[in-house]
Image: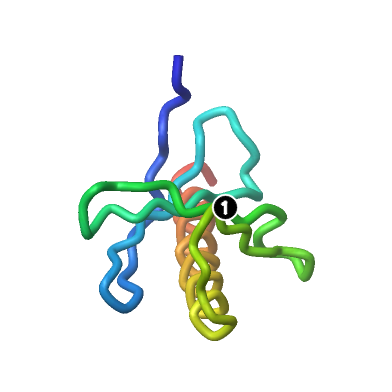
Amino acid sequence: MNPERIVLGRFTLEHRRIEVYQLAGGSTTSVRLRRIAPEPAVDLGYINRIGSPFARLHLYRAEWPAALRRVAKEKATAIWHHAARHEAEVEG
């Protein structure tokens, strides 16, 4: 059985539409990236220890230049920070 995906947000990177999500019951300091457009949807990779100086973007197969990797990591991190703040407001 696959764990539920909790979508934190989406962003556009060049021609790609990318979804940032976490797995229910998984680490709250890890996010996964999935290209949802153009079709077909494909998992791109993940960032663990997000929000820390040790966070690193791990890609499964995409060979992106350093600048594109940096932008993807920054956008995913911003979405994660926004989601974490929103959750704290709801629970707090």
**Label 1 neighbour load within 10 Å: few <14, some 14-19, many 20+:** many
User: What residue is at 43 percent from the left and 54 percent from the top?
Assistant: 20
Location of residue 15 with respect to 57 vertically, above or below: below
| Three-letter code, disc 1 | Tyr
Return the residue nearer the eye: 28 or 92: 28
Q: How many marks?
A: 1
Query: Is 19 on the left or on the right of 56, as rendered?
Result: left
Residue 77, percent across and down? 54, 66
- Above or below for 11 versus 8: below
For the point 51% across and 49% down, which residue is it? 32
- Check disc 1 and report its element: helix, strand or loop: strand
Query: Which residue shows up at 31% across the image and 78% down it?
Result: 14
Q: Quadrant of the N terminus?
A: top left
- Left or right: residue 31 compared with residue 17: right
- Against 16, residue 29 (above or below) is above
Tell me: 28 left or right of 88. Answer: right
Please state which of residues 8 and 44 is positioned toward the viewer in this rendering.
44
The residue shown at (54%, 46%) is: 92
x, y percent for residue 63: 52, 69
Residue designated by label 1: 46
Vertical comparison of 91 with 39: above or below? above
Quarter of the figure with residue 38: bottom left
Q: Is residue 51 left or right of residue 62?
A: right
Give the percent coordinates (x, y) of residue 4: 42, 28
Q: Which residue is most to the top? A: 1
